[in-house]
Amino acid sequence: MSFIDILRTAIFALRGNWMRSALTSLGVIIGIAAVIVMVSVGQGTQAEIDKLVSGLGSQRLDISPDSGRNSSGARGSSSSFFTLSEDDVESIRHDIPEVQFVSGALRGSTQVVFAENNASTSWQGVQADYFDINNWTIAEGELFNAQDYSSAGKNVIIGETVRRTLFGDESGIGQTIRLGRVPFTVVATLQSKGQGGFGQDQDDVLMVPLETSRRRLMGANGVPPGAVSQISLTVTDAKDLSYVQGEVEALLRQRHKIKPGDDDDFRVRNISEIVATRTATTNLMSKLLGAVATICLIIGGIGIMNIMLVSVTERIREIGLRMAVGAGPTDVRRQFLAEAMLISLIGGVIGIVIGVAGALLVGKFSGLPVALNGQVVALAAAFSITTGLFFGYYPARKASQLDPIEALRQQ
């Protein structure tokens, strides 16, 4: 029998009991749909993690104040919030050689105004290494010079969102804008980064020299001289990150005169640990979804095997007639294999459609990142064909081994 004849016979046999065939393919439909949703969500989440890593850096530590309790265990006052200083930054820079870049920072929000345009945005007072630590590059203009950092110069670097809001299609370089009531000159614009790993607009930001932010933007808030609200650093070699974290903690405890057993007045956040935790969680979810999809495919395959065995039993006389008129065991085996694979393939196609639609709906309504691509569809199609081939082989082999004479005696 030719391939066309086998396919035509298989279609005719399935049409004879289409409801049973449809119900048989249900397990494959669910399994394939689950595979597509699982892989799409897994790939989308991994892409989001990669984006988070590129934005935060896998070789980075962030140090922030932790002034909830002082050494005696009492609640700290509001003025004790600024437990970090520029002196801490310089000590880290000089005493820990594994550190590549280190910068202190202050943060706040303000109203920025140019002509009739204005917006509420955040500002960051930074040191020179801050741009390298956070992978900020200049689109137009120049970075702050040494005099800007030392003399609290009233220069500002603006993000793409701020530039677009204030200046439209213009660069804004050289223009004077007001941050609150203080005039600043725009000296550069930042290359766009887009949305961050946590959904925030990374381009809605202003950068000013650290001393400028302390004197001109936070002067009324009683900021201690030299204080910073955060210290960020990167290491030259990612393998040294844990070691550097321990060195930083020991150095700051020494500088802040924290006695053994007392709580630290700072917190060190290891970005790589956060990313590793999120990656492990994602992998666990993917494995759970993969297990569900595999179970559904196995159940669907068992259903196909069961129905094909029933079909062999019901069609014993038909098989005997085919063998009597010249069909060999190979022809019979191919016919039943074609029927099993056709059931699985039809279920796979329907499952692909449902899976793609389900993945899009998950991305739209759950907020989970979803990445659909052709490889996912090809993988699903391969799964469906493999399921039909694997679970259809035994019934097909059983049919091909029937004795023609005994088969013809069946009523």
Image (spheres, helix red, strand yellow):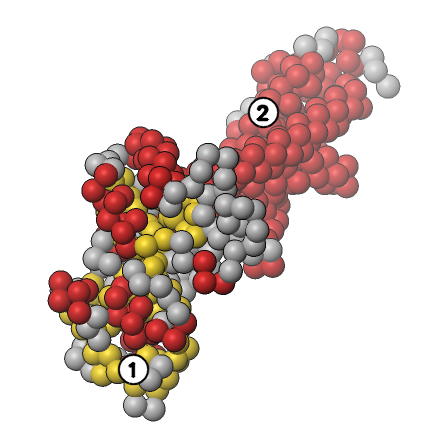
Residue at 45%, 48% in the rendered image: 265
Q: Which residue is mark 2?
A: 389
Q: Earlier in the sequence, mark 2 or mark 1?
A: 1
Q: Residue 324 appears in which quarter of the rendering?
A: top right
Q: CA distance from mark 2 to mark 1?
A: 74 Å
Instruction: Tell me: residue 120, above or below residue 229.
Output: below
Which residue does the image show at 50% across and 49% down from the upper left?
Answer: 70
Q: Quadrant of residue 176?
A: bottom left
Place of residue 262 in the rendered image (x, y in percent of width and height, measured from the top left)? 50, 39
Instruction: Answer with left or right where residue 396 lies relative to residue 48.
Output: right
Q: x%, y% of residue 159?
A: 30, 69
On residue 182, the disc is 1
User: In terms of depth relative to the viewer, which is nearer, 145 or 396?
Assistant: 145
On residue 209, which mark appears?
Answer: none
Work out whether residue 320 or residue 67 is closer to the camera in this orientation and state it.
67
Residue at 55% of width from left, 27% of height from top? 386
**For the residue marked with disc 2, what is the amino acid?**
Leu
The 10 Å Cα crowd at callout 2, few under 14, some 14 to 19, many 20 or more, is many
Amino acid type, mark 1 = Val
Q: Quadrant of the N terminus?
A: top right
102 or 188: nearer the eye? 102
Instruction: Name the image quarter holding the C terminus.
Output: top right
Q: Nearer the viewer, residue 208 or 113?
A: 208
Where does residue 238 sit, x and y in percent of width and height?
Answer: 30, 35
